[in-house]
Amino acid sequence: MTRTMSMVLLLLVGRPSAAEPPPPSASEQRVQREARRLLAQLVGVETVAANESRALGPIAEHLRKSGISAQIYESAPGRGNLVARVKGNGSKRPLLLLAHVDVVPVTGQPWTVPPFKLTEKDGYLYGRGVNDDKGMAAAIVAIAIEARKAPKPLSRDLIIALTSGEETGGFAGAAWLVQHHPELFDAEIGLNEGSGGGITVADDLSRVVEVDIGLGQKRYQSFTVTARGRGGHSSTPRADLNPIYVLATALDRIGRLQFPPRVLPATRPGIAALAKLEKPPLSDSLRRTAETGAVSESDAAVLAKDAISNAFVRTTCIATMLQGSNQENVLPVSAEAIVQCRLLPGDTVDGVREALVKAVGDAKVEIAPARDWGDATTAPGQGVVPDAIRKVTQAYWPDVPLVEGFGFGANDGRYFGARGTVVYGIHSNPTSVDDGRLGFDAHGPDERVSARWYAEGVRWLNAIVLELAR
């Protein structure tokens, strides 16, 4: 799941510090080196909705040789999920460290380096998955191995879960694991990518400019919209019997649908921070919305014109896929679209479907929810995990603004959150705004991460894990 699919905003405004953290210890250097080695190993296996077992097999063996219990659970042949546990003294409930090893396709993308080989060039590490999410997976394994060597046991067990199929809904991975092996996941708290969490560095890579704590995400839910017709030969058509035109009218009406705006406790601080970064009239509407916790009619019209502002306050739906005839000279008997929705917490699948049906206003058009991706929970902004992130960040980069993030995407954390684990969004792969703008971060061609800042991100994540489990 891409970090650019989520919006994170400054909550504490300050001048980013150029202060350097203390030099890494010998233990931290081992973690950094091991993460880099494992990242190259993981990137080298093409895991586009396949081959996760091949990628994870050597990792599992490496963990076992390091004295850590590890096992691969396959939801289908080749679709492996690695679960391992570093034992603590049991004085606190376990900490879940979660990442996925599947990646999105590279087909049709103009890569300048081999996508499935880790390549260092001009200070960057290139390869599919370095950001999303093999960089995090490599860091977690390196951290676990080093923690196992510590002379004093941790206060918590560390549960490592490296999953398959996250990019296609988690049904081969996280969702399957919690359904078939729930006994493995007794964690109190968890760390995962997404939900608005991570580190942002300056475009020139000179310093950290913000640190993000991911608190929540929207619910992912698609709907199929189907119109039916008579079919036949394209040489003797009747437009009134062609389902494509009926579907086009339905999609036009869905495109003009706006859900009522709402302000959530998890999004209100971010809206206030965004107001400080924008210009009038958008900044004024954002400021009033944050101050009142409600959206006036006039402000709603302004916010609707900006994609990020609109996503903060509304459930959104957009058509993404179309299917008609299977040949150009054949009239279709049906035409179907996928409408992809992101639901604010509190909105329901049934309620969104009813809104779509009402907007279309045509009983002949069928609207049905596609596969259920599961609901999401929101984590509190105060607690042991946010406290640990703030403490480590303050020690490493004093005066860097802290961020409470809310993700517009969806990730594996929701499946564990539904079982009671409080999962926070965090990431060991620092990225710049400029790389996001240029498409060099997750899912894009020439996906990359700064070599220097990846090492620092691994060290930062390691310190947070130790803070939570010492």
Image (spheres, rainbow, N blue to C red):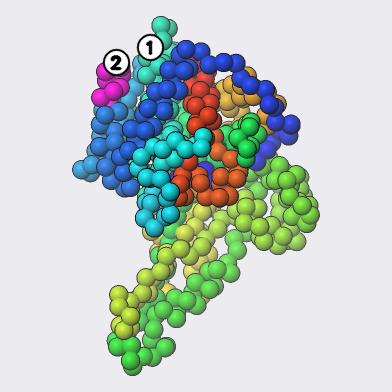
Q: Amino acid at mark 2?
A: Gly
Q: Is residue 119 left or right of residue 81?
A: right
The Cα–Cα distance between marks 2 and 1, rounded to whole angstroms, is: 9 Å
Q: Tell me where the magenta segment starts and ends, as one range.
A: 60-68
| Above or below: residue 68 compared with residue 183 | above
Residue 186, position as x, y percentages in the image? 38, 26
Q: Quadrant of residue 35?
A: top left
Q: Secondary structure at mark 1?
A: helix
Residue lying at the far bottom of the rendered structure: 236
Residue 435, position as x, y percentages in the image? 56, 45
Point out the image quarter for the N terminus: top left
Neighbourhood count class around disc 2 (C-alpha, 10 Å): few under 14, some 14–19, many 20 upward:
few
Residue topped by disc 1: 149
Q: Is residue 269 left or right of residue 127?
A: right
Residue depicted at 77% across the width and 52% down the height: 279
Tell me, for residue 67, which label it has, or none: 2
Residue lying at the far left of the rendered structure: 77
